[in-house]
Image (tube, rainbow, N blue to C red):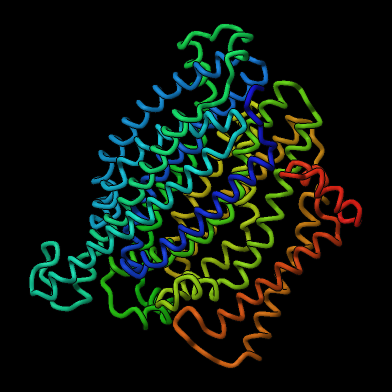
Amino acid sequence: MGGRKKQSLLNGALVLVIATSFVEIVGLLYKIPLTNLIGTVGRGYTGTAYNIYIPIYNISMAGLPVAISKLVSQSVAEGHFNDVKKIFKVAFRLFFATGVIGTIILLVLAYPYAKSIDSMESLPSIIMIAPAVFVCCVMATYRGYYSGLRNQTPSAISQMCEVVGKLVFGLGLAYAVQKYGLQCYEQGLAVFGVQCETRQDAVMALAPYAAAASIFGVTMGAVCSLVFLMLRNKIVGDKITQEELQSSPPAASGKKIAKTLITIAVPVVVSTLVMNITNLIDSWSIQYRLQAAIDGNLSVIENMYSEALSLAGEMTSTQLKSYIYGAYEIALDFRNLIPTITTTLGLSAIPVLSEAWTLKNKLMIRSSIESVIRVAMLIALPSGIGIAILSRQILNLVYGASSSASISATVMTLYGCFTFIMAAAQPLINMLQGIGRADIPMKSVSIAAVVKVAVNFILVGIPGINIYGAIIGTFCFYAITVSINLTSLIRVTGVKLNFKSVFFKPLFCSVLCGVAAWAFTGLLSNILPDFTINSRITTETVSAVIGIVIAVIVYALALLFTRSIAADDVKMLPKGEKICKILEKHGFIG
């Protein structure tokens, strides 16, 4: 193995979890001032741009790297190190071309997409994010390669570089545009071609351009990440030794490797493409049908959101649609938080399961599958329950009191109730990809996508349901996907899961955690003196923070005393053997 040191499944996942947690924290730090700068309507514009960008981005970052990771890990397991080197070169050329094509497609789709949802204001944001597709495709080559070598550290650091770049450039540019636009208004000049009578008119006029400036930070963040990976590869390399290269068979032809890579990638890309095109169709259909619901019965919408609209002020029909959709997008910041973290488990499992499947190591296969699902549930169940119970307090703490808080909080609560299903979806897909059955997620996602689009289109257009129909559609999508993929994974591998260990014990401990959070937050809100320092620091939010800390302690104790932590999981952590012995000594290992 030369100078390389392979990371275990949970060790690699831990590296990615730390990086992802950093990314999410910095992301929130980015979104708080961003929301204050561009407002809920501006968030609606950036959300629209993200929804057309994300499908193409996810193909590059979650689809194609899977093929490299699997093929590299398989070649390493077989000792074909010359193939490993060749895979990187072939993949780089393929991904470079894919990036160019993806960027062109996004630019071509920008105008008709914005026109079709009656949101031409989002067009500048879509154009500003388009170059990121090319950058991310090239970056994906490096991330997939190092993942296949079971070294997740370069990918983790590159993610940190990416989010810091997005924070610095995105906020800086958005602030500059905001300042320029307001200066034009104060001097009596047109604001980006619009003559404004009030400051609110000026804010609305500059919102599309401030949103575009902020989203250009995504492109610049990707550039920062790519620069790091290229420098790291040039300076450190992959640590494959000359002895390993000399002892391995000659590399296969570039044509053969490209064919194998594409064969592995196609079902992965198709399933990722279906999932993300579904989200793109959702973005269009949700806004289209939301506008239909508003136009069909405006009074029903106004009555449903009377609390929010009384604070937000008068809006046109189109602005009301963007306002409600923007409030929904704010809630999605939290909906995606836990699944983003648990996705790291699946990404780390791909090379481990691919190696175990190649070597026919049934013990490693079973241990890996159970560890991924158990750890995903240990993270997702308490988090989802906490988000559902404390949605309003979390929103106020992060974004401060806002007119749209009542809408966003309800959306958060509903999504929190089935966070655990969403958190399991991507790891299950990745594990099936790791054992060479990427065709199964392709089929399950396709079936679920049809159901989701149909449910959304029907329910969102009903005035009495409107945006909440999107939540029902999302639930249907993930419930179908997880059911099919989990059943298939068990059938193909022959693994008999210990559901008591991987689900019921974590659920019991999570319920205790949720009860503690609810009880202590409510109790402290009543006994602490009533105070408001600013819109974020109030009696209610401080009580929630203390309640969360107490709930975490309760959860940790519950895990130990119910012996919900498995020895195999602990052993795969850094210094796992030592930690495992300590826990076993005190009877805390299940």
Q: Percent position (x, y) of residue 503?
A: 76, 52
- 586 left or right, relative to 186: right
- 6 left or right, relative to 490: left
Q: Residue at x 71, y 25 (%)?
A: 357
Q: Percent position (x, y) of residue 167?
A: 38, 56
Using the image as rendered, state which of residue 308 and residue 525 is in the foreground.
525
Compared to 390, does 420 lie above or below? above
Q: Residue at x 27, y 55 (%)?
A: 212
Q: Percent position (x, y) of residue 555?
A: 75, 65
The answer to whether residue 440 is seen in the rendering is yes
- 195 left or right, relative to 341: left
The answer to whether residue 295 is seen in the rendering is no
Q: Percent position (x, y) of residue 157?
A: 50, 44
Number of marks in picture: 0
Compared to 40, does 265 lie above or below? above
Using the image as rendered, state which of residue 345 and residue 59 is in the foreground.
345
Q: Residue at x 40, y 77 (%)?
A: 403
Query: Could you tell me which quadrant the N terminus lies in?
Result: top right
Compared to 126, does 307 lie above or below? below
Compared to 340, does 175 lie above or below? below
Q: Residue furthest top?
A: 250
Using the image as rendered, state which of residue 315 and residue 366 is in the foreground.
366
Indicate the quadrant where residue 298 lies. bottom left
- 23 left or right, relative to 494: left
Indicate the quadrant where residue 442 lies. top right
